[in-house]
Image (cartoon, rainbow, N blue to C red):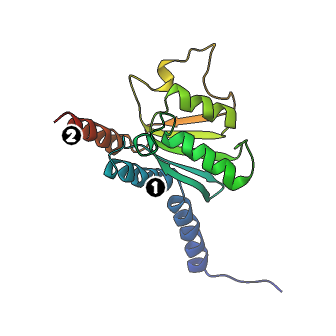
Amino acid sequence: MAVHRSKDHVKHQIQLTRMEFTVFGDEHYMQLAYKEALKARDQGEIPVGAVIVCGQTIVAKTYNQVETLQDVTAHAEILAVTAAANYLGAKYLTECTLFVTLEPCPMCAGAISWSQLHRLVFAATDPSKGFTNFQTKKQRLLHPKTEVVSGLHSAPCKQLIEDFFRELRN
């Protein structure tokens, strides 16, 4: 017995598929990372937020806590990698994507490399301390299989950092 579906039903299914893609796309997760960065700012921390996603499951949401914890390694990315590894019960995050509002520093790039993250998506570049300033074609700081996407929601993330340091100086 054949099932007949109207054109409207098929059109509705296509719209639902498109909607699911955009709701759970990179933009959505970067906006969550931005919200984490706002939490950092509100606590007097450098406003950097990070989210790690496996499939469509959020396994870590964190923000910088260097001042709060009095720990120079308490960057959002390090805390996110630790939280994700604990959540998943695995040290390698080969199926995960890290969304972070600022380009990771070399220390964080090392943690990202060792955890073998599948993807790194960062918003604003860091012209002074970002990892891309310290790597060469021969010496990459990230795992060779890690895919990197930069510039997603760069403007608001860059503005947040600039505003934070402007207020700190005044």
Name the amino acid, label 1: Leu
Give the x, y percent position of residue 76: 49, 43
Considering the image in quadrants, where does the N terminus appear? bottom right
Mark toward the viewer: 1 or 2:
2
Q: Is residue 155 left or right of residue 131?
A: left
Q: Is residue 29 left or right of residue 43?
A: right
Compared with residue 108, is residue 49 higher up or lower down, i.e. above or below? below
- Front residue of 152/134: it is 134
Q: Quadrant of residue 127?
A: top left
- Front residue of 77/125: it is 77
Give the x, y percent position of residue 41: 33, 48
Residue topped by disc 1: 32
Name the amino acid, label 2: Glu
Compared with residue 74, is residue 31 higher up or lower down, i.e. above or below? below
Q: Which mark is residue 167?
A: 2
Give the x, y percent position of residue 42: 32, 52
